[in-house]
Amino acid sequence: MTLTTRLRAFLLGTVAIVLGGFSLTLYLLAQRHLTRQLDDHLTATLNTLEAAAENDPDGIEWDREHRTVNLRRRHDYPIRWVVLAENDRVLDHSGELWSFDTPTGGRYAVTDDEGHIWKTDERILHDVSPVTADIAPTKHRRVTIRAAIDTHSLSANLQTLAAALVGVSLGVLVLTGLTAGWVCRRALRPIRSMAEEARTITADTFAARLTRPTAGDELSALGESFNGLLDRLQEAYERQQQFAGNASHQLRTPLAGLLGQVEVALRHPRDGAEYRRVLETVHESGRKLTEILDSLLFLTRADAQQLLTNRQNVALGPWLQQHVAESWRMHPRTTDLQLELGVDAEVAVVPMLLAQAF
């Protein structure tokens, strides 16, 4: 999976979670608001019907002929209601007599023949007179008011809202996916360019460097870091080449002298003292070769410049006299060497490198 695909998937997942949470929250808030409106409308109907009943100390009167019930009707929430006496005798109703065949008490729901769910509620009115007291024929000891409201519009509105939220969310996701792909490809274009340039760099083109973006962002820092790595690799590569050249040049003469001493000693038999002298000469030549190799290996180290700071203070005159005496004492023409010191000074050097330079 490419980086562009991973970034797009991450962005789409994040947007999907945000849209899902937003849509769910909006749906629940709308459901709560619409349900509250429905309950308020049902409660207002019961309050109006209760106000239409005349509750006197001698009983509850409901006069259908001389009392008009004015209810606030809403086409989106149809209301049906019925007023019942003690023996469930119908005193009045809204025009469509509704059969409440479920247990009474509190709110419950019933389903009509069309499959619509009606949310119902009831209110029981009791008179305050004793049960044994005689009441007028037009009055009742107990009146039950029941009302039902159709929730089909509520369900339809919620379904419409849910469909709209899903449609909008899918549209936003599609648009985000297209936009994210374009943005990711454009943002990662410098990385692709640097990758293509890095593939073309070989040992023959070690001096080439990546084109660093000029935006000053993380990609610029990446290009700068990679170019710094190429600088260090080129330095190490050149140091190795320099070591090979220096080694072939510096070791040729000592090795030739060493082999010459051995060849001369092997031309005819010699006594033990002569062989000992030759071996000492070979040993001294080997020591010089070791010093040369140590100095060359030191100069090829990546931290050679930092190690050069750990120098020693030596007196140049005595050090040179000692170096000449030790380095050339086995040479057959050592007596021809003369060392003249015009100025004696104290210098800060690495003795091994100074000996090699001298």
Image (spheres, helix red, strand yellow):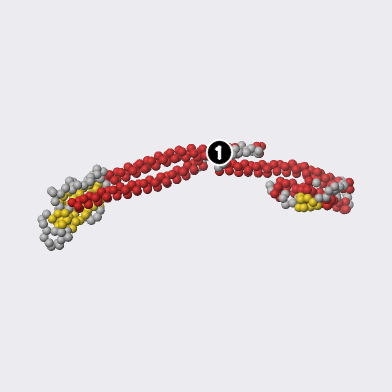
Between 227 and 257, the one lying in front of the other is 227
Q: In this picture, is 247 found above or below 59?
A: above
Percent coordinates x, y for residue 304 in the rendering: 71, 48
Few, some or many residues within 10 Å of mark 1 (<14, 14–19, 20+): some
Relative vertical location of residue 164 with respect to residue 99 in this rendering, above or below? above
At a point 85% along the width and 48% down the height, the residue shown is 341
Q: Residue at x 22, y 53 (%)?
A: 122
Q: Can residue 275 be seen in this view?
A: no
Judge by depth and name the residue closer to the eye, 331 or 260.
331
Residue 313 visible in rendering? yes
Q: Where is residue 287 in the image (x, y as percent from the top left)?
A: 79, 50
Residue at position x 57%, y 37% in the image: 193
Say which quarter of the image contains residue 202.
top right
Identify which residue, 284 or 156, lies in the foreground.
156
In depth, the one of 288 and 278 nearer the eye is 288
Which amino acid, by three-letter code, is at mark 1? Pro
Instruction: Tell me what residue is drawn at x 76 percent, y 52 percent.
Output: 312
At which x and y percent is residue 139? 13, 55
Residue 1 position within the rendered picture, expressed as x and y whole percent measured from the top left: 50, 42
Q: Name the residue under label 1.
A: 190
| 98 displayed left or right of 322 | left
Q: Left or right: where does residue 269 sit relative to residue 165?
A: right
